[in-house]
Amino acid sequence: MEKKRIVVKIGSSSLTNAKGELDYFKFHDHIGAIARLKQQGHEVLLVSSGAVAAGFRKLGYSSRPVTLKGKQAAAAVGQSVLIQAYMSAFEQFGIIAAQVLLTRNDFSKKERYKNAYATFSELLDRSVIPIINENDTVSISELTFGDNDMLSALVSGLVHADQLIILTDINGLYDANPMKNPDAKRLDQLHEITDDMLGFADGAGSKVGTGGMQSKLLAARVALNFGVKTFIGTGQGTYKLTEILAGLGDGTYIEHDALKIVNTSKQWISLAEISGKLFVDEGAKVALIEQGGSLLPVGVCAIDGIFQKGDVVAVYYNKEYLGRGEISYSSDEIRPLIGKRASDKPLIHRDQWVQI
């Protein structure tokens, strides 16, 4: 089998029992399956939920806390419990694991994004399994991923993974709610994620998790945009992950033939905060969208906002959003150049342009 780089995401419901405690039977089932992938020569990154679920009982909570301070306190206790369990279990297979905690800023800030990529590359080069989770203890609501489904999609794009596997307690996406409709049919293959699909996938996750099927489809759509194939489903036993790679998984495969690898620089641009707007004429629109060109000062009609060189700005034609890019000038430097041919240096080079 061809060597692949695989991101495996394990949700809280796939790690815990009905009481919200760490289920060691489920836990070691995942460990054995991941170890099997490593034995076959694949590179594996693990995005693991379960820190809050593993910690809230130890703090005396009867159920998963709902307050931010409760969640963060439970994560502070549970994260150490979880990572110790992982490291000890992987050690039985001669596998070294490393803990990596991320926040939204690690994806929206250029240098931090590059640093994260370099760290993951070094760990994988040394055959280490990164065990990744959100840094729940210090994250605030504005900077979180919402759930680890999206985190797994962002990580899969960052490391240019061949496959994202999202393990959950539901065996894929159905055309109706299988718990309410006995005639619901599973969708074994999807080539895109539409808004309609997101609509009928809406619903809550388990009592110990934060993400339902909708969040998993949103993650799959992001992964597809980054050129990563995705599987959403379930499985048991040592060979469950190798079966998924072979197309025999119990779930939904989301992929298409036109997947393109998005380079690390463009990935960062697609995730960064927008610092301003540029409004362009029709010629600039054609150059950017149809010809794959760069944006020159002569094509700009107006700007909005205050930004610096290296920030990410959105580009519009009238009210139509075209995309975003890393700007080569500050807003003060651009204003005297608007609509002029005084400079052939692009405001946004085509290598720093993303249509999303």
Image (cartoon, helix red, strand yellow):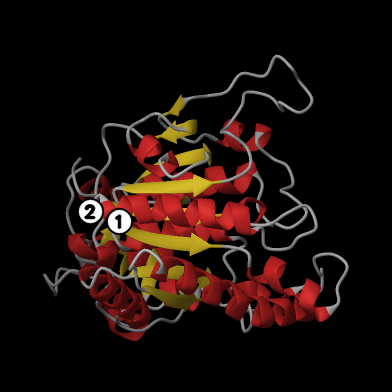
Is 135 situated left or right of 208 in this image? left
| Residue 239, position as x, y percentages in the image | 40, 41
Residue 177 visible in the displayed image: yes
Q: Which mark is residue 223?
A: none
The crowd level at tag 2 (other Cα within 10 Å; few <14, some 14-19, many 20+) is: some
Residue 208 sits in which quadrant?
Answer: bottom right
| Amino acid type for the residue under numbered disc 2 | Gly
Residue reaching furthest right? 62
Real-space CA distance between mark 1 and mark 2, rounded to the nearest whole angstrom: 5 Å
Residue 322 visible in the displayed image: no
Contact between marks 1 and 2 (CB within 8 A): the answer is yes
Residue reaching furthest front? 92
| Amino acid type for the residue under numbered disc 1 | Lys
135 relative to 351, above or below:
below
Is 125 situated left or right of 56 in this image? left
Residue 109 sits in which quadrant?
Answer: bottom left
Residue 209 sits in which quadrant?
Answer: bottom right
Q: Which mark is residue 38?
A: 1
The crowd level at tag 1 (other Cα within 10 Å; few <14, some 14-19, many 20+) is: some
Identify the residue at horizontal 66%, vertical 82% (top origin).
76
111 relative to 90, above or below:
below
Residue reaching furthest top? 183
Identify the residue at horizontal 40%, vertical 29% (top origin).
248
Is 214 situated left or right of 181 in this image? left
| Secondary structure beneath label 2 | loop
Residue linked to disc 2: 41
| Residue 337, position as x, y percentages in the image | 24, 76
Identify the residue at horizontal 56%, vertical 60% (top origin).
148
| Secondary structure beneath label 1 | helix
214 relative to 192, above or below:
below
